Image (cartoon, rainbow, N blue to C red):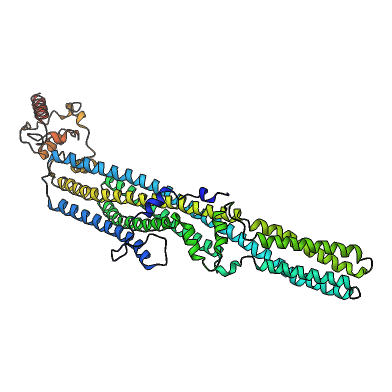
């Protein structure tokens, strides 16, 4: 930890982001140094958000042009053109789904990395605040013991040793040593002058980070749900579901570009700080904390001497001298003045407590503790934090691309669904090959009490007295055939009903199927003719 500048090296992506053009809203270049209080610097970050807003406008404009061309350019609905369009919609949906899954994965990783970096920052701030608070507590406690406890014991001893001038001089010398200790303690840095509570900063940072993390988590889940519902709408050909997902897709597209602008501005601003954090800290603490103290804790180099070494050394020597004086008084004065033993033991206890506080102060004021917290905070912000924000920027870009593809595919799917429904409505209601007619026939079969047509031959013996006219082959209506079969006590097989009474199959059948159908019709006609002659 002695080579702090070697331990902390700003990552390459912070330099890359730092080199982004810094332009204010008047299109004038500004200084790239991290100056959050400067108006021009604030405008340079807002300008990056405006660039993302311009990207959103361009994206929406391209979508509007595409939808206009799709609505205006009416293509002929031919069988050959249906399959390529369907494949186009299918592959567009697959591409949108894959891109969305990749974007959500990248977003989860970036959100976690950013949260880890901010957590490391807050943890380091809490540790630094504990160190500073410990120093203040030790200094305050030692000064209070020296001023109050030691002074009371010396005052009582001064009354007891009033008849011994040499003992009184020893007590006065110890009072001078105590005053010297207090003076050295006052020379230690007064952190209260900084008017900064690191614990409050850490609490505010943790609260903001929690809401940021929760917001991105909801955005990621929302993107995934919208993509899944859109794919479900395409699969089930649900027009209302596609319409709803198209509206939510536009809103998510706007949200993706907005998050991209915010993340980009945050990444650039944080990178400006990470490139030279020490300069910004020194500028903010100028006149409050000495530059030698800041250099000592920021760099923690062996070539730099501890600025508190001299006060701590004087403190140690003063305590050692006072301990020697108290030991002599306990040895020579107590036999003569037994009542002084209690106060002398009290002074020795105060000195022992002050010596323990001195060792703790020496450890806390060493640069290695605070410098480690500083380095941990910088690594958390500049490595994990900025890296996570860059992944969130990538997530926003991928999400925008995915929803753009989805918004292009949904109108085509809508058009295909409308064409299929129109073709379905154009089917002849009298066509026996109509699926709806088959469903109606299967749900409401006529003459449910009649026997099957297969029982016709077995019942001929009881029906010899009936002589129905010969059935016509070419143009017999369906009702005539139904009447004839009812006279014979039979019931036509429902799967053969549509083929009887028609002179030709539907136009969509092939010539081979047409010939097969005609041959079957002729065989049925001959069968009925032979049965009638018999």
* Nearest to the observer: residue 70 or residue 508: 70
Residue found at the very far right of the displayed protein: 336
**Residue 495 x %, y %:** 19, 34
The quadrant of the rendering that contains the C terminus is top left
**Residue 478 x %, y %:** 11, 38
The residue shown at (44%, 48%) is 11
Q: How many marks?
A: 0
The residue shown at (52%, 65%) is 285
The residue shown at (78%, 71%) is 175
Query: Is 148 left or right of 271, judged from the image as shown?
Result: right
* 82 shown above or below 63: above
The residue shown at (7%, 32%) is 471
**Residue 181 x %, y %:** 72, 67
**Residue 279 x %, y %:** 47, 60
* Nearest to the observer: residue 460 or residue 432: 432
Query: In which quarter of the view is residue 186 placed?
Result: bottom right
* 405 shown above or below 314: above
* Nearest to the observer: residue 175 or residue 515: 175
Asked whether residue 444 is in view, the answer is: no
């Amino acid at each position: 930890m002695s080579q702090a500048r070697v331990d902390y090296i700003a990552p390459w992506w912070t330099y890359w982001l730092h080199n982004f053009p810094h332009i204010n809203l008047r299109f004038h270049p500004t200084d790239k140094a991290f100056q959050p209080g400067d108006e021009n610097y604030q405008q340079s970050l807002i300008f990056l958000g405006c660039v993302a807003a311009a990207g959103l406008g361009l994206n929406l404009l391209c979508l509007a042009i595409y939808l206009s061309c799709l609505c205006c350019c009416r293509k002929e609905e031919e069988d050959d053109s249906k399959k390529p369009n369907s494949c186009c919609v299918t592959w567009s949906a697959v591409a949108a789904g894959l891109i969305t899954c990749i974007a959500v994965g990248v977003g989860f990783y970036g959100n976690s990395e950013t949260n880890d970096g901010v957590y490391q920052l807050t943890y380091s701030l809490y540790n630094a605040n504990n160190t500073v608070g410990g120093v203040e507590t030790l200094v305050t406690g030692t000064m209070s013991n020296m001023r109050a406890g030691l002074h009371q014991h010396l005052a009582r001893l001064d009354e007891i040793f009033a008849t011994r001038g040499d003992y009184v001089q020893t007590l006065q010398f110890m009072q001078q040593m105590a005053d010297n200790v207090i003076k050295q303690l006052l020379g230690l840095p007064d952190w209260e002058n900084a008017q900064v509570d690191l614990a409050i900063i850490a609490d505010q940072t943790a609260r903001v980070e929690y809401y940021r993390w929760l917001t991105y988590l909801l955005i990621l889940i929302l993107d995934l749900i919208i993509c899944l519902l859109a794919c479900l709408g395409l699969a089930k050909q649900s027009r209302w579901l596609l319409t709803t997902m198209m509206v939510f897709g536009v809103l998510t597209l706007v949200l993706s570009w907005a998050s991209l602008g915010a993340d980009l501005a945050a990444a650039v601003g944080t990178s400006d700080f990470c490139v030279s954090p020490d300069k910004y800290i020194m500028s903010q603490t100028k006149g409050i904390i000495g530059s030698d103290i800041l250099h000592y804790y920021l760099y923690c180099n062996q070539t730099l001497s501890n600025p508190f070494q001299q006060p701590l050394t004087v403190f140690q020597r003063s305590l050692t001298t006072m301990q020697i004086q108290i030991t002599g008084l306990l040895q020579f004065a107590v036999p003569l003045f037994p009542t002084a033993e209690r106060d002398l033991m009290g002074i020795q206890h105060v000195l022992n407590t002050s010596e323990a506080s001195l060792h703790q102060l020496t450890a806390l004021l060493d640069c290695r503790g605070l410098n480690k917290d500083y380095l941990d905070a910088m690594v958390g912000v500049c490595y994990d934090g900025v890296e996570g924000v860059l992944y969130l920027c990538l997530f926003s870009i991928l999400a925008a691309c995915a929803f753009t593809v989805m918004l292009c595919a949904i109108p085509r799917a809508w058009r295909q669904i409308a064409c299929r429904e129109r073709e379905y409505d154009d089917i002849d209601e009298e066509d026996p090959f109509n699926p709806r007619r088959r469903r109606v026939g299967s749900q409401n079969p006529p003459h449910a009490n009649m026997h099957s047509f297969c029982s016709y031959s077995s019942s001929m013996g009881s029906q010899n007295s009936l002589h129905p006219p010969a059935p016509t082959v070419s143009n017999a209506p369906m009702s005539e055939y139904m009447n004839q079969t009812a006279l014979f006590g039979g019931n036509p097989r429902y799967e053969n009903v549509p083929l009887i009474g028609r002179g030709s199959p539907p136009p969509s059948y092939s010539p081979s199927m047409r010939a097969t159908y005609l041959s079957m019709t002729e065989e049925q006609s001959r069968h009925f003719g032979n049965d009638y002659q018999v």
